[in-house]
Amino acid sequence: MDFQVSEKMQIILGMIDEFVEKELIPLEKDFLADNMDKLLPELAKKQDMVRQMELWAPLHPKEFGGMELTLVESALMFEALGRCPLGLYTFGCQAPDAGNIEILHKYATDGQREKYLHPLVEGKIRSCFSMTEVEMPGSNPVMLETTAEKDGDDYVINGHKWYTSSADGSAFAIVMAVTNPGAQPHKQASMIIVPTDTPGFNLVRNIPVMGHAGSGYFSHAEILYQNCRVPQDNLLGPEGHGFVIAQERLGPGRIHHCMRWIGICNRAFDLMCARARDRIAAPGKKLASRQIIQAWIAESAAEIQAARLMVLHAAWRIDNEGSKAARKDISLIKFVVANTLQRVLDRALQVYGGLGMTDDTIIAFFFRHERAARIYDGADEVHKVSVARQIMKGYENKVVR
C-alpha cells in the first residue's frame, strides 16, 4: 500500500495549515467566550476565502462544487482542519452535514437532490441526523421506538430523539424511524427527510454537555416528533433500508472523525511541548527537564503516530477494497484513536496545570467536548466485541502450532 502524498495534495495541506494558523485560531477566544451565532458573520467571510482558494467541500462531488478527494486525501485534510474547532465548518466538511451529503448523493431522488443536496453542499443550509433515542441503546441502531406510519400519501412520525447534533438552525433532519415493524430487525427502519419547520418537529432544548448547551452548529438537540407529517416522497432510498444506509454512512464517517481527532492530538501535543519548554518548574529549571514530562512527550508522539498510520491504512483499504473489507479496521481505529485522544489531551492539560482547566487555552474545550469520542458512533466496548468476534472467526478451523 502507498500513502505517498501527491505534490498537489502537499500544496493544499500547506495552504490549509497556513489558513488555520492565521485565520481561524485567532477566532478561538471569541468562540470560547460567546455563542456560535455571534461568530457566523465572520465565519461566512472565512468560508468565502476558502471558496476563492478552491478548497471548499473537499469530500463532495465536483458536479456539486466540491473537490471530490479520495478518502485518504480527505483524511489528511481532516487532520489539518481538526487542529481548530472551527476548521471543518469553515471548509464545508463538518459532521453531520458531510455524512448526510454522502447518503443524499447516493440515495436521493432528483427532486430531493435539487431541494436538499445542492444547497447543503453549497453551504447555504445546514442539516442534522436524528437517530439516537433517549430510552434505546445508541450503539444498536436496530432498536428504535420512533415510528413513521403511512396515512394517505404521508408518513406520520412520532418519537423522542436526542443528541441530534446541530439541529439548532438546521433546515432539515434525516430521521431514522420504524416503517416496517413486522419485518426482520435490520429491515424495519427507514430514513426520511423532515424539514425542521414541519409542524410536530419540536426542538425541546439544546442538551447541556459537560455544562455547556451550545448554540447553532455547536449543539446537540433533544427532539420530540409529535404527529409530524411529511410526504412519502421524502423517503430516502428504499423503505426498510435505513440500517443499511446508516452503516454506509458510518464507515467513511469514522475515518473523518478519527483524523479530526488526530488533528486535535497534534494541536494538544504542540501546546504541551511549548508549555514544557517555557514553564518554570524550579529556579533555573523548566518543565521539559523533568523525566516524567519527557516520558509523556515521547509516549504521546509514539501513540499519535501509531494511531495516524492505523487510520490512513483503514482509509486506504476503503478506497481500494470497499468498506466491507475494511470493517475490522474501521472498528479498530474507532476505539484506538478515541483513547489516544483522551490520553494526549489529559497529559497536555496536566502540563498546563490550573491554566489547562480554563478557557484561556483550547485544551479545556477539547477535553470536555471530545470525551464523547469513546461513546458516539458506537461505544468502545461495542467495537472491541465486534473486532474480537471477527478475529475469532478466523480461528475456527485454523491450525496453530
Image: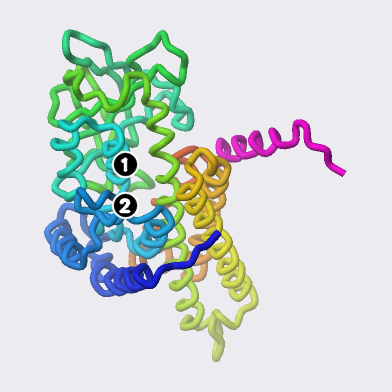
Q: Amino acid at mark 2?
A: Leu
- Image location of residue 317, percent across then percent down: 51, 49
**Is 237 placed above or below 271 here?**
above
The answer to whether marks 1 and 2 mark residues whose Cβ atoms lie closer than 8 Å is yes
**Residue interval drawn in magenta:** 380-401
- Image location of residue 60, percent across then percent down: 28, 50
Could you say which quadrant of the image residue 180 lies in? top left
* Direction from residue 350 to residue 226 in the image, left or right: left
**For residue 352, which numbered disc appears in the image?**
none
Q: Residue at x 42, y 61 (%)?
A: 264
Q: Which residue is label 2 attached to?
A: 59
Predominant secondary structure in magenta? helix
**Is 38 placed above or below 135 here?**
below
**Is 99 placed above or below 305 here?**
above
Characterize the local packing of mark 1: few (<14), some (14-19) or many (20 or more) Cα atoms within 10 angstroms: many
Q: Which residue is label 1 attached to?
A: 102
Q: Amino acid at mark 1?
A: Glu
- Image location of residue 106, percent across then percent down: 30, 36
Q: Nearer the viewer, residue 315 or 194?
A: 315
Characterize the local packing of mark 2: few (<14), some (14-19) or many (20 or more) Cα atoms within 10 angstroms: many
- Image location of residue 312, percent across then percent down: 50, 57
What is the residue that sits farthest to the bottom in this orientation?
284
Classify the position of the N terminus by image quarter: bottom right
What is the residue that sits farthest to the right in this orientation?
401
